[in-house]
Image (cartoon, rainbow, N blue to C red):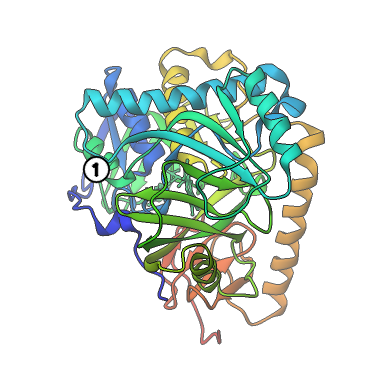
Amino acid sequence: MKNGKSIWQKTIEQKNYPQLSSTIKREAVVVGGGLAGILTAYFLQSRGVDVAVLEADRVGSGQTANTTAKITSQHGAVYHRLIAWFGEDGAGEYALRNQKAIEDYAQIISKERIDCDFQRLPAYLYTKKQRQVLKQEEAAARSLGVPCRFHNETELPFEIGGALEFENQAQFHPLKFLTALGEKLEIYEKTPVLKVEGKRIFTPRGGVLAGTIVFATHYPFINRPGYYFMRMHQERSYAAALENAQPLKGMYYGIDADFGWSFRCAREKLVMGGCNHRTGMIPGEDPYRQLSKQAKILWPESRISDCWSAQDCMTADHIPYIGKFSHKTPDWYVATGFNKWGMTHSMVSARLLTEKILDRSAGKKSIFSPRRFKWSRGTAAMLKDGAISGKNLFLAWAGAAPKCPHLGCRLNWNPYEKKWECQCHGSRFDEDGALLAGPSQTDLLRKGVKK
Ligand SMILES: Cc1cc2nc3c(=O)[nH]c(=O)nc-3n(C[C@H](O)[C@H](O)[C@H](O)COP(=O)(O)OP(=O)(O)OC[C@H]3O[C@@H](n4cnc5c(N)ncnc54)[C@H](O)[C@@H]3O)c2cc1C
């Protein structure tokens, strides 16, 4: 089975936008034309802001092209933990904003008449072994006002220990949505931002003087200030589209470490996802083989038609960073660290950043603030990430493997994807060293390195 393009990329014709080739002035610039960037620009423009989007490659060519596109406030069994860590107020803000994001999608799609296979349907968390965890999650979600129901059975072709349904969630075709929304905006493609100094943005053939700058580049590529590279790592997951599998009426996400498969349908295909691992930490078995084996067990008559993979930024406390980029840069904002739930988190970012920029509600405390820090929650994960970076920096210095242009960590060869991957921060490069994903912003200079 060969990894390749997602079913979304294969079923969309995208518009080309020009490259920026002069110096312009705008009230706001959004850097990054993924879901977070396009939605933020759309919200700002809807409020009368003169905004342009600068995209390094093509709109929707980043992680948004390879998502599974469930629009849900059900992000694994998070609510019990969020209440324990951040109290009912913090957890409540997370739940409310993510629930609202689903309604925002429905409203935008209806208002702009976007044909993007948007469907309302329930989302289920399921478990074989951790019934008690789901029971706890049910109580936690209810206490925050999220409508949910516990089930002992589902339509899935295997026995479960329990399932928790969140009602009235949604799914869609992410690139159809993004493309339609992009057509309403001023966008420059093939326009990587090379450097930002205060309000001045530099690109290869032009520049922008911007009142406000939003970094929606998935992983922020500016290391200092902000220091996001010390606060996040990236994780990859794999997806396969199956033909001739049983159609499902809901979306599913497993919470057991050894059976955490994700399922949804997309027209006549069933999309199955899983096999998570830290980017650059190469698994012992080919994830595509694992997906294929499991698909055959669950739906023996099925056949894999497409498979692909993606990665996302993971924060220490599992909450995104949405807000001011740093205390030193009053006009910079950021949206990152979506922990694999970027469909609703992108919408939350767009709304929250628009509020912060225009309503100057910046003083209001938010659980999403990039400046939040709880010693009890952040320290262990940050120390672990720091130790991994230290080890890979040393190995890069001591060994022959190629070094990542971002901060010099050793790169590992992923034989299943035929890509170089950085375990520290998640940059990726193809066989010839061409950049595929940041935070690195440059290709790899390889000097006769063996895989
Ligand atoms: C396998 C998998 C399945 C997932 N499934 C779901 C799901 O079902 N539901 C859900 O909610 N979430 C899901 N997610 C998460 C979700 O896909 C992501 O969080 C989301 O797509 C991230 O969007 P983004 O706009 O932040 O990033 P991107 O889509 O990566 O956009 C960032 C853009 O910035 C551009 N860029 C980078 N650097 C520069 C620069 N210097 N100058 C200009 N532009 C730049 C890039 O080219 C890119 O186009 C999944 C993630 C994975 C890994």
**Residue at left offset 55%, top offset 33%:** 165
Residue under label 1, please give it. 179
Q: Secondary structure at mark 1?
A: helix
- Relative to 365, does residue 331 appear above or below in the rendering? below
Residue 27 appears anywhere in the view: no
Question: Which is nearer the eye, 76 or 196?
Answer: 76
Question: Which is nearer the eye, 450 or 182?
Answer: 182
- Relative to 196, does residue 13 appear above or below in the rendering? below
* Kind of residue at badge 1: Thr
Residue 123, given in percent of the width and then of the height, sits at 50, 37
Q: Residues within 10 Å of mark 1 (few under 14, many from 20)?
A: many
**Residue at left offset 18%, top offset 53%:** 13
Quadrant in the picture for residue 133:
top right
Residue 60, given in percent of the width and then of the height, sits at 33, 49
Quadrant in the picture for residue 144:
top right
- Relative to 409, does residue 340 appear above or below in the rendering? above
Question: Which is nearer the eye, 229 or 239?
Answer: 239
Q: Is mark 1 within 8 Å of ligand 1?
A: no
Residue 334 appears anywhere in the view: yes
Residue 210, given in percent of the width and then of the height, sits at 35, 30
Q: Quarter holding the N terminus?
A: bottom left
Q: Quarter holding the C terminus?
A: bottom right
**Residue at left offset 24%, top offset 40%:** 187
Question: Which is nearer the eye, 301 or 326?
Answer: 301
- Relative to 255, does residue 427 appear above or below in the rendering? below
Q: Is residue 61 left or right of residue 67?
A: left
